[in-house]
Image: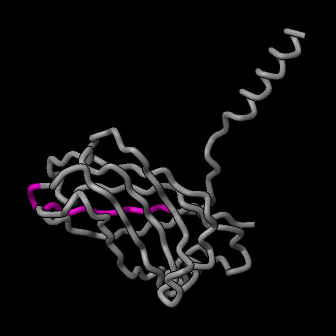
Amino acid sequence: MLKNVLILTALVLVFSCSKQEEGQFQLEYRMSLELPPDANPLFTHVFEKPIASDWNNFLAAHNLSQTDIVKIRPRSVILSPVFNNAISYGIISEAHASIYDLNDPGGLLPIGDLYDNIRSDEELVLLPGLADVKDLIKNEEFVLKLEFNLRQFPGSVSEHFLTVQFDVFIN
């Protein structure tokens, strides 16, 4: 009996530890934002920006067509300072990134989340989501959205980039 339990446990461990699936191509988009010094910790701070997808140029550059694309998933979502400023991202308690179609704000797709941030690194790394965002990326434009809550007032103006990378999977 004990032998069977050990074998079953070993199998579960072997098959549950897997590397993140990677696409054949990557797309990267960047949004800049400015955090004011008086950003109130009691409010959720929302930053949105329409982003040109440049989708047709991507397809042409890689000699692909729309039918070649199987799915597009978030690879990484990172908030970082613009000018290597000494900033502690420990003031952010939680953050959520998403995208949506400019004509359909209700069709929000989550692409990255961070709950109960306890780190104060030089970058804020959100856990990438699993949503297939192909239908949004193939539009000429989509909206990139970042929401976060603060633990305290920032105290000074700071500029940041939200950099999002997507894996593109083909047939």
Answer with the quarter of the image where residue 74 lies.
bottom right
Residue displayed at 50% across by 87% down: 140
Answer with the quarter of the image where residue 116 lies.
top left
Question: Which quadrant of the figure contains the N terminus?
Answer: top right
- Coloration mode: one colour
What's the magenta region?
A: 155-165
In the drawing, does residue 76 fall left or right of residue 136?
A: left
Q: Is residue 161 magenta?
A: yes
The front one of 152 and 84 is 152
Q: Is residue 77 magenta?
A: no
How many marks do you count on the picture? Answer: 0
Q: Is residue 14 above or below residue 74?
A: above
The front one of 154 and 139 is 154
Is the stretch drawn in magenta largely helix, strand or loop?
Answer: strand
Q: Position of residue 19 (x, y in %)?
A: 63, 41
Q: Quick one: which residue is furthest to the left in this view?
A: 156
Residue displayed at 26% across by 44% down: 90
The front one of 162 and 26 is 162
Question: Which quadrant of the figure contains the C terminus?
Answer: bottom right
In the drawing, does residue 11 fall left or right of residue 111?
A: right
Residue displayed at 35% across by 76% down: 48
Q: Quick one: which residue is furthest to the top in this view?
A: 2
In the drawing, does residue 143 fall left or right of residue 107?
A: left
Residue displayed at 36% across by 44% down: 117
In the drawing, does residue 144 fall left or right of residue 111?
A: left
